[in-house]
Image (cartoon, coloured by chain):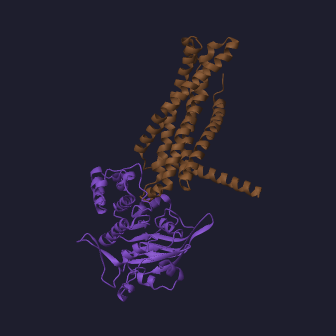
Amino acid sequence: MSEPPASVQPDSVQSSKGTAPAPDVRPVVVFRNVSIAFDDKPVLEDVSFSVAPGETRILLGPAGVGKSVLLKLVNGLLRPDQGSIQLFGQEIANMPEAQLFPMRTRTGMVFQEGALFDSLTVRDNVGYQLISERVPDDEIDARVHEALRFVELDDTFALYPASLSGGMRRRVAIARALIHQPELLLYDSPTGGLDPVTSTTIIELVMKERDVYRTPSLMVTHRLQDAFILCTHRFDEDQGCMVPLPQGVTNPDTTFLMLEEGRLIFDGSLHELLHTENKFVREFLE
Amino acid sequence: MATNNIERTAKQLVLTAQDYSLFAWRALMNLFSPPRYWPEYLVQSDIVGFGSASIVLLSGFFTGGVLALQSAATLSQFGATAVTGQFVSITMIRELGPVLTGIMVAGRNASSMASELGSMVVTEQIDAMRALGVDPMRKLVTPRIFACISMLFFLTIVADAFGILGGGFVTVFLNHQDGTQYFSKAWESLRYPDIIQGLVKPLFSGYIIASVGCFYGMRTTGGTQGVGRSTIQAVVNASVSIILVDFLVTRVLLALFPPL
């Protein structure tokens, strides 16, 4: 079991739990009673949650419970069989594909294995959206360099994905997701299959995006240590690295969702996660 | 149990045919509305056209040669070896040129399209493209279809020309007949309906090759094994469809332009 943080959330932090945004602030994502099945086998059943502006939601659960499916529903890559999904205030569950494309450009998605285009250089991968929008080459180069500097891979500009390590590919995928300054970030197991040092580097980038640009995000992971680091650390811009929060303090905008066999069984803060009575959650944490 | 299997297979076939029809129609209609990806079209034209030129050229040349060999043996029994040129040119231009080119290009390009797109599907590159706001149908499928249609038209002309050349080579160097007679008969016997028939067929074959290749590529499931399965399905279905559609088109064109 990963060592849970010793800190306990102060009351003030708990009361500001991200699932209840201020009334005048619209959630970025709202799921209401969403269900989806493949070949008559239910994958997600009656799932409801929301993501508020500036909030980072960590989606936990063992392999095969529908975490990646849920993430693909958020930006319309999959369509639900039942229920309502709102993205940036618009209902997308039945939106035609042609209307979904401009909606998706407002989101950034990091896929499980990076999903970089093999036949394109890192420059063309990261600048893919800008190229398709016919942005001038000079501007594309400048913005790709900026995005690659963010993930500390500026020297890979002219390389092909095949010559990058697994960790580097994920970082390039993060740069690709960030280049269009998305209003929502979706991370699908960004640290899956990576060594602990590289995983920490990736989590630091997720944290940097959260704390520097305040971009709301939904992150799928089954690595508890990654989730706990995100809750108990902040990115220090002066030092250029993540630093631990004071003892007993956790990030109020980083909250948890947990799936069990397609059903959402937990929605709450780190404090609530650590003190829940739910047997499945307790087993997962242990 | 057997009835259930037949019913399930029949439903699956109807569903696949429906999916393919929608897919092929949408890919075709994409050309009439923006965004259009002309650079992709040029890249695919190079891959399909220039890349397939050598196999089309060789298969055309040797098919023409075989036709000359076989026909000369039979025609000599009637003292009609002088019409070898006519036989080769009409057979190549009306039938064998378009069909052989279609099948050769299907073997090379339907398989490559299915495996390339299939690999992109299983590595989530297609989803990544959609997530980046780009329509894979417009970016990947439509340019391939139009590249394949336009290039197959020219490749068929190359196959016809090299088929007649191959027939001429055999006629002169192996059958020791008069080359001038062969080429003049080959030329004189051609009528416009023959040319039209030979050049209409590759338009259908090109559409079939690319749409079937892309269709099976885009619906790939099941990892690398699935990519292999899609590739086989693409080549088999494209080849069979080319021959089937060739039959239908020939029937229609013969009704429109009856032989003298």
Give residue A156's position: percent from left, percent from top. 31, 54
Quarter occupied by residue A7 = bottom left
The answer to whether residue A6 is seen in the rendering is yes
A25 w.r.t. B235: above or below: below
B173 w.r.t. B113: above or below: above
Looking at the image, residue B205 sits to the left or right of residue A193; the answer is right
Colour seen for chain B: brown
Quarter occupied by residue B92 = top right
Looking at the image, residue A55 sits to the left or right of residue A152; the answer is right
B22 w.r.t. A194: above or below: above
Looking at the image, residue A115 sits to the left or right of residue B115; the answer is left
Quadrant in which the C terminus of chain B appears:
top right
- Residue at the farthest bottom position: A11
Quadrant in which the N terminus of chain B appears:
bottom right
Q: How many marks?
A: 0
Give residue A29's position: percent from left, percent from top. 44, 72
- Residue at the farthest left position: A238
Identify by letter the chain in purple: A
Residue toward you, B98 or A242: A242
Residue toward you, A92 or B183: B183
Give residue A218's position: percent from left, percent from top. 42, 70
The answer to whether residue B191 is seen in the rendering is no
Quarter occupied by residue A233 = bottom left
Give residue B70's position: percent from left, percent from top. 64, 20
Residue toward you, A150 or B180: A150
Looking at the image, residue A13 sits to the left or right of residue B70; the answer is left
